[in-house]
Amino acid sequence: MHKSFWMPKIQKKKMTSVNNKTHVDVILRTCDRRSVHMGTRFVGASKSEIILRCTRSLIESMNECDADLSLQVIDDHSSPQTLEELQNILARSRHPASLEALEETGANASAIRANTLALGSRDLVYFVEDDYLHYPEALSEMCDAYVLFKERLGGTEVALVPCDDPLNYRRMETCRVVAGPRRAWRTNVHSTSTMFLSAQTVKKFRHIFERFNSNAMERDLVTEEETINTIWREGGVTLFSPMPSLAFHLQDTPPLFEDWQALWEEMRAEEGGNRGSKEKLQKSDFPKLGEV
C-alpha cells in the first residue's frame, strides 16, 4: 500500500515542537489613514477600531502561545490616539513587543520595512496585516501545524495562512484536505500579505517578495497572483489554510458559515487587558497530536 503523507499513523513519541527550539518573528503593519480595501468592510467600523481590536486579538493569541515569540509593529503615520492605544495594548504582551513609527509614508514603506526585518530573522516569520482578527489559539496552532506538516512532507518547506478565505469556495480548484493538530487544513495556492513561513523561504524568494512589497498599494500593476502566489504554485513550498479559520480577514467579503461577530465583540476596548478566553472562545480540549 502506498504510504501517504496525508493519513499517517499517530506517533506515540512527542512531536518535534517549535516552542523551545525556534524563534518566531511576528511582524505587524498598521496604518489608520488608508486601506487597500477601498470599499465598505463587512464589520462597518473605522480603520482605527479595526486595528485596535485586531491587535488586541493578536496579543491575546501570542500570550496563549508558549513558543519563543517577539512582535514588531511597523506603523505608517497613524493618528496619535491610535498610536497611544497601540502602545497600551503592546504593554499587555508577555512576549517582547515594540512599535516603530515610520518616517517615510505610504504602504510601500511599511511593506519594504517588514520584508527587511524578515530577511534578518533567524527561524520563522509571521507577516500580519492590521485587519486580521485572531482567535486565542491561532499562534499556537500555526506553530504546531507548521512543524507537523513539514515533518509529514519530509522536511520540504511549508507556509500557512490563518484564514479560510471565502474566495476559496468560488474557485473551482483541486486541493487536499488534511488533519492538523486541532482542525482540518486544506492545501492552497492563494495568499494575501498575511502568512506564516520560514525565514529561509523569504530569503530564497527575496526577489518575489521585494517586487510585491515595493508595489503594495499598486494592485493594478503588481498582484499576489503574479508574485507571491507563484511561490505556492511553482516554488516547491506547500501552502495550507485552516478549516475553520484561526483568524478572520476583515475585508469586504464576510467569512462563510463562521461566527466572526462573537470574536469581534470579545475584542472591545472596554474589555481590554489579559482577560483570557471566555468559554465560547476557549482553546480546544482535544489532546495534541503525539500526546495520545
Image (cartoon, helix red, strand yellow):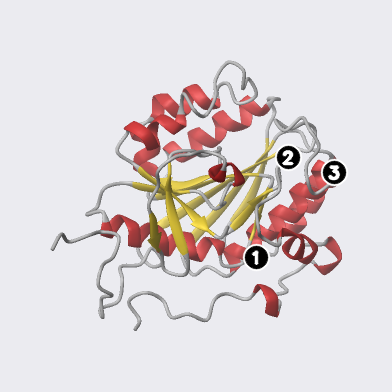
- Report how far apart the C-alphas of labels 2 and 1 lie in the structure: 25 Å
Picture quadrant of residue 78: top right
Amino acid type, callout 1: Glu
- Between disc 3 and disc 1, the foreground one is 3
Distance in Å between CA atoms under marks 3 and 2: 13 Å
Circles 2 and 1: CB distance less than 8 Å? Answer: no
Please state the horizontal and vertical placement of residue 25, each as a whole percent of the image: 49, 50
Report the quarter where the N terminus lies.
bottom left
Q: Identify whether 43 is placed above or below 215.
A: below
Task: Estimate the x, y position of residue 101 in percent, counting from the top left.
Answer: 70, 37
- Provide the residue designation for mark 1: 60
Question: First in sequence: mark 2 or mark 1?
Answer: 1
Crowdedness near tag 1: few (<14), some (14–19) or many (≥20) residues, C-alpha within 10 Å: many
Query: In front: 266, or 42?
Result: 42
The residue lying furthest to the bottom in this view is 292
Amino acid identity at mark 2: Asp
Question: Marks 3 and 1, Cα distance to the nearest angstrom?
Answer: 21 Å
Q: Residue furthest top?
A: 221
Residue at 55 percent of width and 62 percent of height? 138
* Residue 233 in picture, x, y percent from top left: 37, 34
- Quick one: SS at disc 3? loop
Q: Which residue is mark 3?
A: 46
Q: Residue at x 69, y 54 (%)?
A: 55
